[in-house]
Amino acid sequence: MDIIRGIIGLAFIFGLGYLISFDRKNVRYKPMAIMIGLQLVITFVSLNTAVGIKILGAISDFFSWLLKQAEGGTNFVFGGIQMEFVFFFHVLMPIVFVSALLGILNYIKVLPFIIKWTGKLINKITGMGDLESYFAPSTAILGQPEVFITIKEQISKMKPQQLYTICASAMSAVAAATLGAYMTMVPGQYVVVAVFLNIFSALIISCVVNPYDPKTINEDASVNLVGAEWVSAEREVSATSEVSAASEEREPFFQMLGTYILDGFKLVIIVSAMLIGFMALVTLLNNSFEIMFNITFTEIMGWVFAPIAFALGVPWDEVVKVGSIMATKLVTNEFVAMGELAKVAETLSPKAHAMISTYLISFANFGTLGIVSGSIKSIDEKQGKMVAKYSVKLLVGATMASMLTATIVGMFF
């Protein structure tokens, strides 16, 4: 039954993709089939085999261990504050530590090596193109807007089709620096599975919504993986920074480390501000609607998204709860939605919990759409206008990628 519901969910997603497709006649079925097959294998091995479960458990335990190490710095600075659990200290502040680790791994060329060869392998298997295959794993590690700096020299040369694909990939992934924070709010195994599946989900959706042949569309826009071996190795966070991999001298280690630490802290402050603002607005809307209509805003959104949740395979008696969380993520962000999930997690079935947990592991929301559009515009104004022109389809495509990941996971419960 779960397999049948999953197939129905896939049909719903691809049917929607076909309706909004830029080119319905040239949908790329072969790469889609290959990548869906890979997703099914990854999910089955990860969630239904002893080896996969053990590996996911080890990864989750490793991140839990990292978070405990991060407490060393947090306790040193804020140790005088008596607290059992404070979201800012226990969930967000470890991002600073993880950001520092990413800087070290980037500096010693571990991350560039992983991204380069992962991209080559994806391109070899799927034929999605050098640029697209390189960008998919890199955005899963860096997140956006930083990831766009790694291809800033290619952005001005891209055709609209390529631009759509890389932006959809950026919105469908998450930054590695936030993985530990996510694991404090949803089960770690679902976070890890979603990260792997999302690499392919955005590419699969692009095969329907935005199909093109990467070999012929624009040879000049192909990324040189050796030359682009992380232009962001020096980690210029501003997308307007002038970065040159060929001419810029290697940044001193401790200067680089300080930059990454400050970048991590900036991210913590940004996320904190977003959460305060969005949570306050959601509270205002819920209380206002309850006073006027005797029903909260999130409950209304839950009913609106309930048919979508049901189509994806969520059990009927849980579609309103899951639909409400899906809507919350779309209009706010994944952290706010995870907070809502925490309130009802114990009342959800394992299948519904797994599906909504993996759905939340992406940046697909209205706020991120503005960040992506602004980042591209700061690099190339013409291309930024192109992204803005197709912003609605971009958000829908990125959301469909999250739906695809959740549907694949739901097939194994």
Image: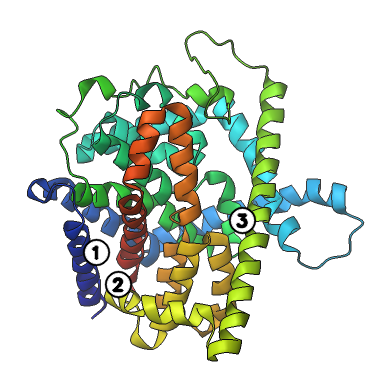
The circle on residue 181 is 3
Query: Looking at the image, which residue is at 86% across and 52% down?
Result: 78
Q: Are marks 1 and 2 in contact (CB under 8 Å)?
A: yes
**Nearest to the observer: residue 163 or residue 410:** 163
The quadrant in which residue 185 appears is bottom right
- Three-letter amino acid code at disc 3? Ala
Query: Looking at the image, which residue is at 55% across and 11% down?
Result: 248
Residue neighbourhood size for the residue with mark 3, other residues' Cα within 10 Å, grouped as few (<14), some (14–19), many (≥20): many
Query: Looking at the image, which residue is at 50% across and 68% down?
Result: 328
Can see residue 322?
A: no
**Nearest to the observer: residue 211 or residue 32:** 211
Q: Position of residue 33 (x, y in %)?
A: 17, 53
The tag earlier along the polypeptide, 3 or 2, is 3
Q: Nearer the viewer, mark 3 or mark 2?
A: 2
Residue located beneath label 1 in the image: 13
The tag earlier along the polypeptide, 1 or 2, is 1
Task: For marks 1 and 2, give the CA distance.
Answer: 8 Å
**129, above or below 313, in the image:** above
